[in-house]
Amino acid sequence: MTFGNAIIHHFFRFFLHNPMNRRNFATTIKPHQDVLMKQIIITFLMLLTVVGAAAQRNPVEGYIITNQNDTVHGTIDYQSTSELCRICLFMAPGDSTFKALLPTDIRGFRLLSDGVYYVSRTMTIQDKQQEVFAEFLIQGGVSLLHYTSAKKDDYYLFIGEDGQEVILQDDSYDPLSLDAPTQLKQRLNQRRELFTIFGKSTETLDKLVKTPYKANELTKLVHQYDEAYCDEQNCILFEYDRKKSRNLEVKLFLEAGESVTDYINGVDYNDKRYGNSIWGPHGGLGLQFHSPRRLPALYGNVKFALTYGKMTGVTDPDYQGNQDVWSDDFYLLELSFGAEYHVLYKKKHTPFIEAGVNTIMMDFNGLYGGAGYEFSLGKHKLRIGGRYTNSFFKNNDTYRRNHFDAVLSFVF
């Protein structure tokens, strides 16, 4: 048994198959909450000691272009734009680890079926020449490249038909701001520099003065200029494919576990006619959403879950004081929407916390929160955790439902 499997085995044995735990949960509310919290803390402290050393990657197929102009296909870690402008993590076929390549090591790299294209360039950033990877937004008669610094500052490099270069920095221009006159004066000075690039169209130059220095807006202007004034038949050789670069991942996941539910009447917590601790199996099916480039640590999910249990209680006393014991099977259908934060998102194995909203059979609305640990299994993931839900009956806010799930889930 591997160490990871041993911890998972311990978790379920500790939480779900210990008779003392069941007795604690079956009595009053306060004792079982105290025991539960202690068990959660102990177990997750153990889990936090198992942190993988390897970094979490976002691998996609691509290739690098060597300084000898050779093409080498392999896998590229599709990181954020600022990271890709600094370093290319490449793994050749047959290798098991990524190799870090700097702008001086290669001429460029391409990925996502040629939808994204970076080249090595020497750019003057804040009066200092730097070797960087710049991303092609459009390659044609006039070309446009984009560079994002480690501080998230955006720079745009225009290259004219004869090789002239002009660099603009995003100035967050707002014509209604107090800084607008100063920014406009600076933009008019830049217009003189850009004349060497867009000299065939004063209309384009005028638009540049008023246009936000953003990738979308500048790409449209350069595209229109190339289409109108480029003399070659195939003027636009490459254009950034925004749809391919979104890289939104949607994955199916299944979860199973055991649940304990308390139905509580706010009038009397200890009245066994209304307070019942109910154990039962739990299963769920859902979708997980993730944008590894834009929000690497944040995940979203939507899930349907079904919980089975047997509710027991006693009837109200009759005129002789007699009470009958009753029992009833029940099924809870739950729809939930939530978000997860992965604490060590750059690691293969990471703890996570989650929160969200749910509705149960359209009768209860509530909030949930939880924590767990995720183990990477190649392209798949194994997760173990606990989740607490507090919900209220729509027609009576004193009638509450407290619900705890201990679950094991698998992300495909």
Image: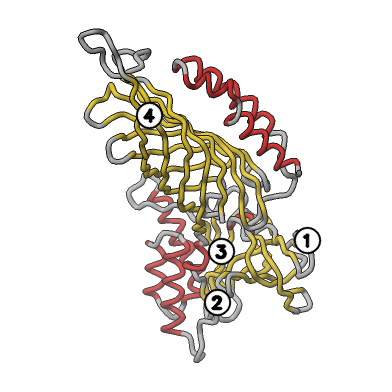
Check disc 2 and give the amino acid type: Gln
**Are the two marked residues, 1 and 2, in contact with CB atoms closer than 8 angstroms?**
no
Secondary structure of the residue carrying numbered label 1? loop
Secondary structure of the residue carrying numbered label 3? strand
**Are the two marked residues, 2 and 4, in contact with CB atoms closer than 8 angstroms?**
no
Which label is found at residue 96?
A: 1
Which label is found at residue 146?
A: 3
Which label is found at residue 139?
A: 2
In this rendering, which labeled residue sits more in front, label 3 or label 1? 1
User: Which residue is at the far top?
Assistant: 320
Q: What's the CA distance linking mark 3 and mark 4?
A: 62 Å
Q: Residues within 10 Å of mark 2 (few under 14, many from 20)?
A: many
Q: Position of residue 6 (x, y in %)?
A: 72, 38
Name the residue nearer the viewer: 224 or 310.
310
**Residue at image coords 60%, 70%:** 117
Q: Position of residue 219 (x, y in %)?
A: 46, 69
- Residue, disc 4: 311
Q: Which is more N-terminal, label 4 or label 3?
A: 3
